[in-house]
Image (tube, rainbow, N blue to C red):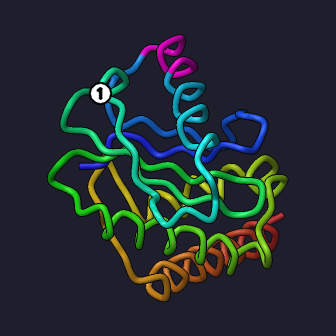
Amino acid sequence: MITAILVINNQGKARVARFYNDVAVDRQKNIISNLFRIVSRRADDSCCCFAQDETLFGPDQKIIYRHFATLYFVFVADAAESELGVLDLIQVFVQVLDSCFENVCELDLIYHFDRVNYILDEIVMSGMVLETNAELVLTAIKETKKLESEGISFLGGLG
């Protein structure tokens, strides 16, 4: 199960923070700063995208991350999840974001947080992985956009 999904910028500010268990806000801030400290100190050219810190989540939790441009995509998962599977999941998430926003950047995550959260919900729900195929996720997003635009035109016709 996935415990947390975070997208953190190079300054350590969380742009997306999703915890799948009950974590107090002050503890979330502590977790975000510690995760940023862990992942930012590692060299980008290092092939290892895995870390562990038992003090943050416990002994059976793994930190899997990727650094793209100015953003760290960090997933925290338990021992039941495959590290390479989660790394692939990060790639799917970034690929879908890139397709939806055409070269996604940090500002897209800030100004379109509702769409980002919807995309994340299509991929992971309540800590369980729902979909790993980027094309299927993009299809679901396009169908939702189509329904939203039909709803707007339908309501606009009533007025």
Residue drawn 48% across the image and 39% down it: 18
Left or right of 72 on screen, residue 49: left
Q: Is residue 53 above or below residue 55?
A: below
Give the number of callouts: 1
Image location of residue 17, percent across then percent down: 55, 38
Q: Is residue 5 magenta?
A: no
Image location of residue 84, percent across then percent down: 32, 69
Residue drawn 66% across the image and 36% down it: 14
Residue drawn 77% across the image and 54% down it: 70
Q: Is residue 101 above or below residue 75?
A: below
Secondary structure mostly seen in magenta is helix
Residue drawn 40% across the image and 45% down it: 51
Left or right of 141 on screen, residue 157: right
Q: Foreground: 126 or 62?
A: 62
Q: Foreground: 53 or 157?
A: 53
* Quadrant of the drawing holding the C terminus: bottom right
Q: Is residue 122 above or below residue 9?
A: below
Magenta span of residues: 24-30
Mark 1: which secondary structure? Answer: helix
Mark 1 lies on residue:
54
